[in-house]
Amino acid sequence: MRSAYKFRLYPTEDQIKKLEDTLETCRQLYNDALAAKKEAWEDDRYNLTYYEMAHQISTNRKKNQAL
C-alpha cells in the first residue's frame, strides 16, 4: 500500500528572498539559452547541442558573478 504526504512550508522572509533570487537566476539562464538557440537557428539554421548550451550557460554565469 502506498501513502502520500503533503507538507506545507512557511519560509521566513530571508528564505523567501533567497528562493526568489534563485528562481530569477534560473529564469534568466533559461531565457538566455533559449534566445541563443533561437538566434543560432535563425542566423545559420544551426541547432545548438545540449553541450554547447551548457558551456554557454556556465560562461554567462561567470560573467554575471563578476558583475
Image (cartoon, grey):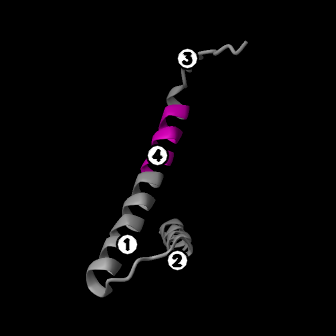
Hey, what amino acid is under mark 1?
A: Lys
Q: Mark 3 highlights which residue?
A: 8
Local crowd size for mark 4, using a 10 Å CA cut-off: few (<14), some (14–19), many (≥20): few
Residue at 34 percent of width and 80 percent of height: 40
Q: Relative to residue 61, is residue 4 drawn left or right?
A: right
Q: Is residue 24 left or right of residue 11?
A: left
Task: Give the secondary structure at mark 1.
Answer: helix
Q: Residue at x 59, y 17 (%)?
A: 7
> Between disc 2 and disc 4, whose residue precedes?
4
Looking at the picture, which amino acid does disc 2 mark?
Answer: Glu
What is the three-letter code of the residue carrying label 3? Arg
The magenta region covers: 15-24
Locate residue 9 relative to residue 25 in the image: left or right.
Answer: right
Can you tell which of label 4 and label 1 is closer to the viewer? 1
In this rendering, would 40 be left or right of 5? left
Q: Which residue is mark 1?
A: 37
Q: Is residue 56 above or below residue 9?
A: below
Spatial separation of the CA atoms under disc 2 and disc 4: 23 Å
Query: Most extreme residue toward the left, as rendered?
Result: 42
* Residue 41 forms part of the magenta stretch: no
Amino acid type, mark 4 = Leu
Badge 3 or badge 4: first in the primary sequence: 3
Dot 2, crowdedness within 10 Å: few (<14), some or many (≥20)? few
Q: Which label was assigned to residue 52? A: 2
Q: CA distance from mark 1 to mark 3?
A: 38 Å
Q: What residue is drawn where x is 50% and y is 28%? A: 13
Residue at the spot of label 4: 23
